[in-house]
Amino acid sequence: DSGVTQTPKHLITATGQRVTLRCSPRSGDLSVYWYQQSLDQGLQFLIQYYNGEERAKGNILERFSAQQFPDLHSELNLSSLELGDSALYFCASSRSIGSGANVLTFGAGSRLTVL
Amino acid sequence: DAKTTQPNSMESNEEEPVHLPCNHSTISGTDYIHWYRQLPSQGPEYVIHGLTSNVNNRMASLAIAEDRKSSTLILHRATLRDAAVYYCILRDAGGGTASKLTFGTGTRLQVTL
């Protein structure tokens, strides 16, 4: 157990639907990162939050949004789902930002299947 | 982010040492070298990182070339549980928006009996 908790572990839904993935960071970690891993794209960085504020954005689609709440947990919202959104979604957390030595701890992932 | 180059795949026998190479010829003076691995059906897992000097921890050793343009992750005795994709990543010490990790395609390590 890495200390980063992601729910749900598996999710099956239909095209056009909306889902929310949840992440609880490791105790004491202030920064949360979301990554998408599909078969043909590898691990793609989506977005990062630090203490409730968005800090970096990657190739996140406009249909996707995220936020980090005051208790530091984060949610990734995926809407108008398409078949191509089927992927593993990983959350990671870190103690801080601003250092090249900063280490990320990843959760076990949420597997999304869009039918 | 500065780019790294790794072999697509490597094979090792169990109980043998494994040397996983990584080239990063465009590394800047403030880039840390990080290694993560991803076991099948799991999230990525931190292995080791370093800046200039060689590093050892309970999982592996990291050997960094004197000019820092390459590095080698060393697993001293590979086991079947070490079969994974190993990613070599550069992280800027400047932080801020550079604090994300950018994953490449990594090296898929196969370990056989």
Image (tube, coloured by chain):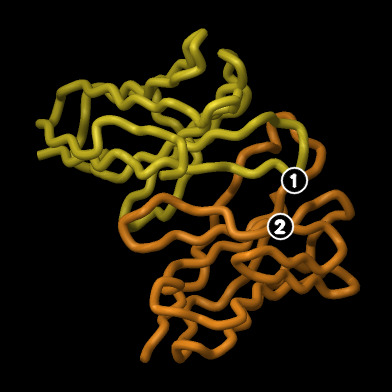
Q: Mark 1 near mark 2, Cβ–Cβ under 8 Å?
A: yes
- C-alpha span from label 1 to label 2: 7 Å
The quadrant in which residue A30 appears is: top right
Which residue extends farthest front? B58
Percent of width and height locating residue A11: 17, 35
Residues indicated by labels 1 and 2 sit on the same polypeptide chain: no
Q: Which class describes the residues within 10 Å of circle 2: few (<14), some (14-19), or many (20+)?
A: many
Image vertical order of residue B43 relative to residue A8, above or below? below
Q: Which class describes the residues within 10 Å of circle 1: few (<14), some (14-19), or many (20+)?
A: some
Give the residue drawn at x 51%, y 61%: B37
Image vertical order of residue A43 relative to residue B8, above or below? above
Chain label for disc 1: A
Find numbered disc 2 in the image and state the secondary structure of the residue it sits on: strand
Image vertical order of residue B65 relative to residue B102, above or below? below
Q: Chain A hue?
A: yellow
Find numbered disc 1 in the image and state the secondary structure of the residue it sits on: loop
* Chain displayed in orange: B
Left or right: A15, with B95 as reference point: left
Q: Which mark is residue A101?
A: 1
